[in-house]
Image: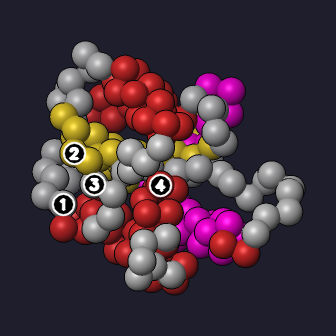
Amino acid sequence: MFILVTGGAGSGKSEFAENKTLLFDANPLYIAAMEPSGSEAARRIERHRAARAGKGFKTAERYTDIKNLDVGGTALLECISNLLANEMFSPTGSPERAAKEVIEGVRALCGRCANLVAVTNETSCAGRDYGEGTLSYMKALGYVNAVLAKKADEVYEVCASAAIRIK
């Protein structure tokens, strides 16, 4: 089973995804993709750690190259948007290569575990002017999300902590 959970920043998608994951397995793997770079990232990482404390998750920090991660059982990937940024803005990264790596990685994870729940962000509704790098990232994330949504067994959009099943 592959479930994709999307939504805007602060929408409640992470909590929904954690709860959905725990329906499959009491001790799932939490694949953390946010690189601890800077105080804002450290704050967000700590908030996520605190939110899942005591829930039985085992954590694997993996910022790139998830296709070679040995999983088994059930896993929660948090999150596709961080993983894409890590791949894209690496020294050898590009939008096309990053999108390919993320999609191949998720496909590989789906083949290596019984259940995968993946969180991603909705970023293309902001309506602001962005630089070329940010626009390239947003376009690549939109593409990755579309490909993964097509592959997913279930897709949920979370807004204000309310999840709507869209597939």
Q: In the image, is 157 to the left or to the right of 58? A: right
Q: Badge 4 is on which residue?
A: 82
Classify 10 Å Cα crowding around label 1: few (below 14), some (14-19), many (20 and above): some
Residue furthest to the top: 54
* Chain part drawn in magenta: 134-162
Q: Distance from label 3 to label 4 (Cα)? A: 10 Å
Q: Residue 65 in the image: state x and y as whole percent.
A: 28, 68
Query: What type is the residue that disc 4 sits on?
Result: Asn
Query: What type is the residue that disc 2 sits on?
Result: Ala
Q: Main secondary structure of the magenta part?
A: helix
Q: Which element carries disc 4, helix, strand or loop?
A: helix
Q: Tell me if residue 147 is in the magenta stretch.
A: yes
Q: Badge 3 is on which residue?
A: 62
Q: Badge 1 is on which residue?
A: 69
Q: Nearer the viewer, mark 1 or mark 4?
A: 4
Q: Which element carries disc 3, helix, strand or loop?
A: loop
Query: What type is the residue that disc 3 sits on?
Result: Arg
Q: Distance from label 4 to label 2 (Cα)? A: 15 Å
Which residue is pictured at 52% across the width and 51% down the height? Answer: 120
Q: Which element carries disc 1, helix, strand or loop?
A: loop
Residue furthest to the front: 38
